[in-house]
Amino acid sequence: MTSGTVHDVVIIGHGIAGAALAWEFLLRGHQPLVIDRLASTTSSLVAAGIVTPITGQRVALGWRIAEFWPVATAFYHATAALLGTNFFHRLPHVRLLSSADEERRWAEKQHDPAFKEWLVSPAPDPLIPKGIIPSPGFAMHSGWLDVPNWLAASRDFLRARNALLHAEAGPVTPNPNGPATIQTSAGPITARHIVFCQGHEASSHPLFSWLRWKSAKGEILDLNIPSLPSDRILNRGVWLLPLGGNRFRTGSGYAWDDFSSTPTPSARAAIESKLQNLLQLPYEVTGHSAAVRPIIRESRAVIGRHPSHPSIAFFNGLGSKGVLHAPWYARQLADCLLHNSPVEYESDLCRND
Ligand SMILES: Cc1cc2nc3c(=O)[nH]c(=O)nc-3n(C[C@H](O)[C@H](O)[C@H](O)COP(=O)(O)OP(=O)(O)OC[C@H]3O[C@@H](n4cnc5c(N)ncnc54)[C@H](O)[C@@H]3O)c2cc1C
């Protein structure tokens, strides 16, 4: 990182987006430089990291799940091989239905081959463990990324290779004919490609001011629940993620008018009230955190080169699907930067709507 060095790729932000892109470059044999201020609360550090193939009140298959899932699982597997630890844990996910409408939708869809592929067969027996309010439901294949520990391991790996700079990134000077320079608290850095992966914070970046953001704050509670089995994720309007032993996480709600990372009593009350529809056991709240999901076009990533400054690129808008979508879009963005491949229209930064 000596002055005068022109880096190939500089990535601003080491959340799920920036880390996935950094690893895509590393796995292809390139050396990126990642710059992050290493804040203690970010969307990625708060995220539960769950991937849910069948979602929502419509009991619908997640958008392009059959394409994204194999890419995501192969990607986290590949990072595990270099990090020496696996952070993506496959786990059955028991979805309990909470209305007659949901039951009707499920009855219509459960024999559809596209759905059946995601069902755990045979389902865990019993499907609903003691301490959970019984209702109809099903078990699907699922998993979760231990995001904070994956990012911590990634940070150490990058740091050991001089590929992580702990600094505040400032203004950037694009250059139409060559590398761009970004000011940082550690001095100016010049690179052929500078990719902004700043999460919700990019909503005030002057170079991307035409994007319309719809970010949403979410909150998570850490729980201690004695005697609830920890072999499955449970979900009935609110999810319960087992972390091992008596430790669980639950959440997470959407607030559209508060972009702080301050946990609120009202969000906690809302989560606990939903939990009453799922859990019959006593529990203790041991932690409470909040962060803002970066949302631009629903939970669909926005990637690509800046329309006027080809050395500047963007990777953001992962919404609530960061773990599932980041590897797919990191791959596309790396192809775009290295080989000038076009990015998919629906996620293109330059899309005009
Ligand atoms: C409560 C909650 C629950 C969630 N649950 C899930 C879930 O179960 N599954 C799932 O897939 N997703 C979940 N998400 C969504 C997921 O967290 C996001 O999709 C993802 O974290 C977005 O990652 P990102 O890298 O774009 O942004 P961020 O995580 O915000 O990362 C941006 C990084 O850039 C750094 N940065 C920004 N500006 C600068 C600067 N000027 N200088 C230096 N560094 C800078 C920040 O410090 C940060 O590290 C959840 C989110 C929340 C809030």
Image (cartoon, rainbow, N blue to C red):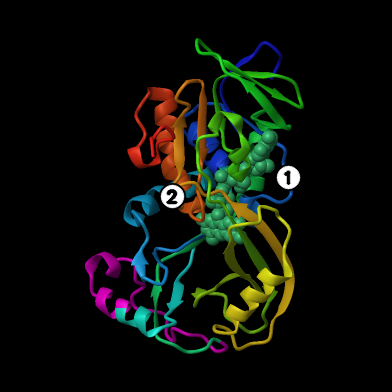
Q: Position of residue 74 (x, y in %)?
A: 42, 48
Which residue is painted at 69% across and 82% down in the image?
283
Report the front residue among 286 and 231: 286
Give the quadrant of residue 327: top left
| Residue picked out by circle 1 | 39
Q: Position of residue 66 (x, y in %)?
A: 32, 55
- The answer to whether mark 1 is within 8 Å of ligand 1 is yes
- Asked if the residue under mark 1 is in contact with the one under mark 2, i.e. CB atoms within 8 Å, the reply is no
Query: For mark 2, does the 10 Å Cα neighbourhood hold few (<14), some (14 to 19), or many (20 or more) residues?
Result: many
Q: Pick the quarter of the image with the C terminus.
A: top left
Report the front residue among 159 and 52: 52
| Residue picked out by circle 2 | 72
Query: For mark 1, does the 10 Å Cα neighbourhood hold few (<14), some (14 to 19), or many (20 or more) residues?
Result: few
Q: Pick the quarter of the image with the N terminus.
A: top right
Circle 1 sits in a helix, a strand or a loop, which is it?
Answer: loop
At label 2, the amino acid type is Ala
Please tell me the numbered disc located at residue 272: none
Q: Which residues are magenta?
A: 105-131
At label 1, the amino acid type is Ala
